[in-house]
Image (tube, rainbow, N blue to C red):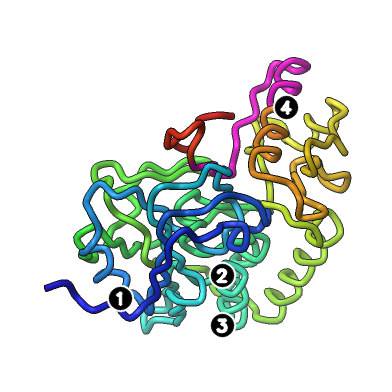
Amino acid sequence: MAESLRGQLRSNESMASHVSWRAGGTVARAFFPADLADLAAFLRQLRPDEPLLMVGLGSNLLIRDGGFDGTAIFTHGVLDTLRREDDGSFYAEAGVASPKLARFVGNAGCAEAEFLAGIPGTVGGALAMNAGCHGGETWRYVERVLMLNRRGETIVRAPRDFAIGYRHVGLKEASDEIFAGAWFRFPTGDAEVARARLQALLEQRMATQPLQLPNAGSVFRNPPGDHAARLIEAAGLKGTQIGGAQVSEKHANFIVNPKGAATASAIEMLIGQVQAEVEDKFGVYLVREVRILGAIGGRLAQDGEGV
């Protein structure tokens, strides 16, 4: 007999209201779990080959207009446990917003977590892509992680179980596990200093990034020894528009949706144009940070296709 679920399962859920670009198609199924145990029960009932998408704040994600024929699981506000352990480490579930973790760590008198305030996503997303900014990277502070597999089993893993790189993290052996939470350790610091640094970083973000407009954060990874924003600006692409999507005038590595009218296709086309023109002018191919998933011409395309 199937286990009773306490969360909410919806069909044909529009992703435009769940991603920070405010654009995109639908997912065939969307599950909003009640908690981690409920998510585990849901996973046990899924087909083993069901395409699965984890969504936190949707800040680095775009679902194509053709939709995603799979299941999206929404973690923000649900997998929200955040605590200081007796050994001094910090435990955060995957749905905790990265800035919330930054404030929690700083208020506890530890240092170097301030960079997390500049990551507009959740702990789960930060773990999955080794998110970083202002000289900090997520996995530098990870002691161990809690994973959840498709059979609903929890596994505690160490960093050595993962191949960790710049904006990419992957398990070396297993492939059916998702991030459920992690234990972090930060050095001892001064709470007042941490709060002041956090505030300064937030003010810098406000001054240099188009945060008042729908966006997905940095679109491209910085190439070795350079900055994507510098290359895009040097190519004369600031302000370039396609169908309501625009390369930000404020920060060239942001694509914005100023009037909320851009389709996912328009955003993806603009990403492709930026890549093509930068490569043509400078011989540098800009690699996307944002994930793009969904159907192209009736076919389910994986991340990285179609751009």
Viewer-side label of 3, 1: 1
Figure label count: 4
Q: Residues within 10 Å of mark 1 (few under 14, many from 20)?
A: some
Q: Amino acid at mark 2?
A: Ala
Left or right of residue 291, residue 271 in this image: right
Q: Are marks 4 and 1 in contact (CB under 8 Å)?
A: no
Q: Circle 2 sits on which residue?
A: 97
Where in the figure is residue 164, as x and y percent of width and height? Answer: 42, 44
Look at the image and give the residue range highlighted in magenta: 275-294
Where in the figure is residue 27, as x and y percent of width and height? Answer: 47, 54
> Which of the marked residues, 4 or 1, is nearer the chain's N terminus?
1
Look at 56% across and 76% down and name the residue there: 105
Left or right of residue 67, residue 20 in this image: right
Viewer-side label of 3, 4: 4
Q: Secondary structure at mark 3?
A: loop
Q: Are marks 2 and 4 in contact (CB under 8 Å)?
A: no
Q: Circle 4 sits on which residue?
A: 273
CA separation in Å, label 4 and label 1: 43 Å
Q: Between residues 86 and 126, which one lies in front from this camera angle?
A: 126
> Which of the marked residues, 3 or 1, is nearer the chain's N terminus?
1
> Which of the marked residues, 2 or 4, is nearer the chain's N terminus?
2
Is residue 183 in view from this perspective?
Answer: no
Q: Which mark is residue 108?
A: 3
Q: Circle 1 sits on which residue?
A: 38
Is residue 125 in view from this perspective?
Answer: yes
